[in-house]
Image (tube, rainbow, N blue to C red):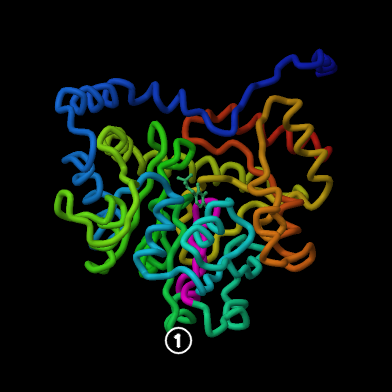
C-alpha cells in the first residue's frame, strides 16, 4: 500500500465530548422518570413523604448502615453531621485541602476550624500518616474525602481516629457505592455525607444530599436538625434548619438508583479501557489501592509533561477536560484567616498543577474512548 493518508482539514473529524452527558442519561430513563414525577404530582406530598422514606431505606441498605437521613445538599449533609456530633465553636476538624470547597466550608459553617493535612500523591486522598501530628487538644474529628469516587484509606484512618478519641465524618459526595475492604463508603465513619448534585454519580434534578450513620441517636439528632429542630409539629426542642431532601427529588433518585450499578460498571469499563490504552505514555492513570472498588466519578490522570498544553490540545479537539481542583483550599481567599501559605501542602499543590480529568461517563461509546486515547497519543507523538 503506497496511498498516503489524506490530511484532515482543521476541525475535520473532531468529536465533541463533554465531561459529562446528562442528556444521554435522561434519554435512557425518560419514561420511568416521568412516571415517578407524575405520581408525586398526583399525591401532592412534597416534604418528608413516602418516597423520601423509601429512598432513605434504600440508601441505608446500599451503604450497609442502619440510618440514612435525606437533606437539602451534600454540603448540608456534612454540616448537619458535624452539628449532630456536637462539633462547633472552638473545635478543630482535620481534612485535606485537595477537595471541593464544600468540605472545608462545612467544617467552617458548623463553627469549627478546618485543619488541613496533605494528600497521598498516588491516591489523592488523605495521607493517614499525617493525622497524628495535626492533632491538638481541640481536635474533635477527621473528615476524609473519598476523592474521584474511591475510598480513602479508611482502615488506617479509623484506627488512628479511634486511638485518639476522634470522630470520623466521611465526605462521600463523589463516592456512592465505592467500597474499601468489602465495606461501603459511608459505613466506616460515625457519620457520612453524600451529595445528589446533578453531576454526581447519582444525581437529582437539583440539589440533594444524605447523611448516613449507624447511631440511632445521631440519626434522630440529624432528623431534628433538618426540620427546624422539631419532631412534633410546632414543638421545637433545638434550633435547627430547613434542610430536607424533597419527595420529588427522592422519587427521581429512586428511579436512578435502580440503574446505578450498571452505570458504575460502565464507568469502570471505560476506565479500564483508558488505563490499558494509555500505558507507555507520560501520563499516570488513577491508582487504585488493593481492597478498593473505584466508582470513577472522575477519571483523573497526572500529566507530568506539559499538562497545560495537553489540556489545551484536548479542548481544541473537542474533548472537554477539567482540573478537580485547580486551587487547593488552603490557598482560597475565604480561608486566608487560617494562615496557610503556598508550599504548605506540596502534594496537593502539585496535583492541582498536574492532574486533569477526562470524560468517563457511562454512555461513552467505544469509538469515543478510542478517539480520546488517540488524541492523547497524538499529543505525545506516540
Ligand atoms: C459535590 C461535593 C460536595 C458538596 O455537595 P453539594 O451537594 O454540591 O452541596 C462536598 N464534597 C465534595 C468532595 C464534593 O465533590
Nearer the observer, 76 or 118? 76
Q: Residue at x 59, y 45 (%)?
A: 299
Q: Position of residue 53 (x, y in %)?
A: 19, 46
Q: Is residue 4 left or right of residue 110?
A: right
- Dividing the picture into quadrants, the one containing residue 334 is bottom right
Q: Position of residue 57 (x, y in %)?
A: 21, 51
Residue 100 vertical position relative to residue 130 in the rendered view, above or below? above
Nearer the observer, 104 or 360? 104
Magenta-span inclusion, residue 147? yes
Is residue 36 in view from this perspective?
Answer: yes
Q: Quadrant of the N terminus?
A: top right
Q: Residue at x 74, y 59 (%)?
A: 349
Magenta-span inclusion, residue 379? no
Q: Position of residue 194 (x, y in %)?
A: 40, 52
- Circle 1 packing at 10 Å, graded few (<14), some (14-19), many (20+), is few
Is residue 65 in view from this perspective?
Answer: no
Nearer the observer, 77 or 221? 221
Q: Position of residue 181 (x, y in %)?
A: 41, 68
Q: Which residue is mark 1?
A: 163
Where disc 1 sits, the SS reads helix
Q: Residue at x 78, y 32 (%)?
A: 313
The boundaries of the magenta stretch are 140-157
Q: Residue at x 32, y 55 (%)?
A: 240
Amino acid at each position: 500500500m503506497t496511498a498516503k493518508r489524506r490530511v484532515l482539514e482543521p476541525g475535520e473529524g473532531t468529536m465533541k465530548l463533554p465531561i459529562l452527558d446528562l442528556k444521554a442519561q435522561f434519554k435512557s430513563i425518560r419514561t420511568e422518570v416521568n412516571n415517578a414525577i407524575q405520581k408525586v404530582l398526583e399525591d401532592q406530598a412534597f416534604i418528608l413523604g413516602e418516597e423520601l422514606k423509601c429512598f432513605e431505606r434504600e440508601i441505608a441498605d446500599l451503604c450497609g448502615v442502619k440510618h440514612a437521613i435525606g437533606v437539602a445538599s451534600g454540603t448540608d449533609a456534612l454540616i448537619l453531621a458535624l452539628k449532630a456530633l456536637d462539633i462547633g465553636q472552638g473545635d478543630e476538624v482535620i481534612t485535606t485541602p485537595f477537595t471541593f470547597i464544600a468540605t472545608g466550608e462545612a467544617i467552617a459553617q458548623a463553627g469549627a476550624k478546618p485543619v488541613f493535612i496533605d494528600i497521598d500523591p498516588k491516591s489523592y486522598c488523605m495521607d493517614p500518616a499525617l493525622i497524628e501530628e495535626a492533632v491538638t487538644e481541640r481536635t474533635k474529628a477527621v473528615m476524609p474525602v473519598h476523592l474521584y469516587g474511591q475510598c480513602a484509606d479508611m482502615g488506617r484512618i479509623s484506627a488512628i481516629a479511634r486511638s485518639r478519641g476522634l470522630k470520623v465524618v466521611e465526605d462521600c459526595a463523589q463516592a456512592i457505592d465505592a467500597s474499601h475492604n468489602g465495606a461501603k463508603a459511608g459505613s466506616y465513619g460515625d457519620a457520612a455525607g453524600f451529595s445528589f448534585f446533578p453531576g454526581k454519580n447519582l444525581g437529582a434534578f437539583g440539589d440533594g444530599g444524605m447523611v448516613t450513620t449507624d447511631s440511632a441517636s445521631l440519626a434522630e439528632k440529624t432528623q431534628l436538625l433538618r426540620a427546624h429542630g422539631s419532631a412534633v409539629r410546632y414543638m421545637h426542642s433545638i434550633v435547627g434548619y430547613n434542610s430536607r431532601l424533597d419527595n420529588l427529588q427522592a422519587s427521581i433518585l429512586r428511579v436512578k438508583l435502580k440503574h446505578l450499578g450498571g452505570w458504575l460498571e460502565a464507568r469502570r469499563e471505560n476506565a479500564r479501557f483508558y488505563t490499558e490504552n494509555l500505558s507507555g505514555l507520560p501520563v499516570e492513570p488513577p491508582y487504585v489501592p488493593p481492597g478498593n472498588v473505584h466508582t470513577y466519578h472522575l477519571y483523573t490522570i497526572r500529566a507530568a509533561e506539559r499538562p497545560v498544553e495537553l489540556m489545551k490540545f484536548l479542548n481544541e479537539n473537542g474533548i472537554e477536560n477539567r482540573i478537580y481542583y485547580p486551587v487547593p483550599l488552603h490557598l482560597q481567599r475565604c480561608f486566608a484567616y487560617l494562615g496557610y501559605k503556598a508550599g504548605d501542602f506540596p502534594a496537593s499543590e502539585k496535583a492541582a498543577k498536574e492532574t486533569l480529568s477526562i470524560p468517563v461517563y457511562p454512555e461513552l461509546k467505544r469509538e469515543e474512548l478510542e478517539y480520546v486515547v488517540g488524541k492523547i497519543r497524538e499529543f505525545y507523538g506516540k
